[in-house]
Amino acid sequence: MIDLDRIDRKILATLQQNGRISNLDLAEAVGLSPTPCARRIKRLEEAGVIEGYAAKISPAALGFSICVMVSVKLAKQSPDAAEQFMTAIRAQPEITECLLVTGNVDYLLRVWVKDIEALRSFIREALQAIPCVAETSTMVILETQSTNRLLNVPVAGRKARPREADLPADRV
């Protein structure tokens, strides 16, 4: 784990808000000159703190109207079954997230499809066709209340606090 100072944390918080900010504007926002700011970013990238940069794309703009969470239970718990499952789902572009979870299921998948027919086809022909899959359960996302994907970057030496937007209405 890399030691992050106050400026590193400001850089991370700013880049989460705007990954396309110029180095000049970022340097000004965090109180550095451009060259040391660029060096810090490079160090954060090389240390794996910054994993990459990406655009947030609207699923609806690409014709995806249905998002579901699919819980998956494997037939048996073994390294071979887990590898077989992971190999099979990596080939499925509909899956945008795969989480290994605890509890009475093994995996939770976020899946985007164009319509109900595409969902039916995905579940039957892609997911349930994987030999190690014993059981699936699908939950349709009706509405997304929060799309904040930003990590709370705590100030050095302080415990992370929830952002006001993340607090229940009665605690604001």
Image (cartoon, rainbow, N blue to C red):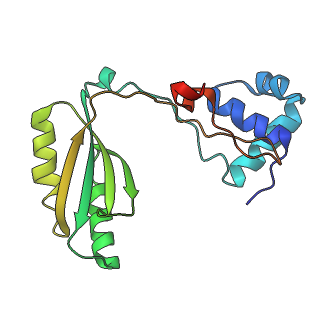
- Across and down, in percent, residue 49 comes to 67, 50
Asked if one can make out residue 19 in the rendered structure from this viewpoint, the answer is no
Instruction: Between residue 27 and residue 79, name the one nearer to us.
Output: 79
Q: Is residue 56 left or right of residue 24?
A: left
Asked if one can make out residue 26 in the rendered structure from this viewpoint, the answer is yes
Q: Is residue 71 left or right of residue 35?
A: left
- Across and down, in percent, residue 57 comes to 42, 27
Quarter of the picture holding the N terminus? bottom right
- Across and down, in percent, residue 15 comes to 67, 32
Rendered image quadrant of residue 89? bottom left
Q: Is residue 153 left or right of residue 91?
A: right
- Across and down, in percent, residue 128 comes to 14, 58
Rendered image quadrant of residue 59? top left
Residue shown at the point (80%, 49%) measured from the top left: 4
Residue shown at the point (82%, 46%) measured from the top left: 156
Rendered image quadrant of residue 72? bottom left
Quarter of the picture holding the C terminus? top right
Instruction: Between residue 21 and residue 106, name the one nearer to us.
Output: 106
Instruction: Between residue 36 and residue 117, name the one nearer to us.
Output: 117
Residue shown at the point (10%, 51%) measured from the top left: 124
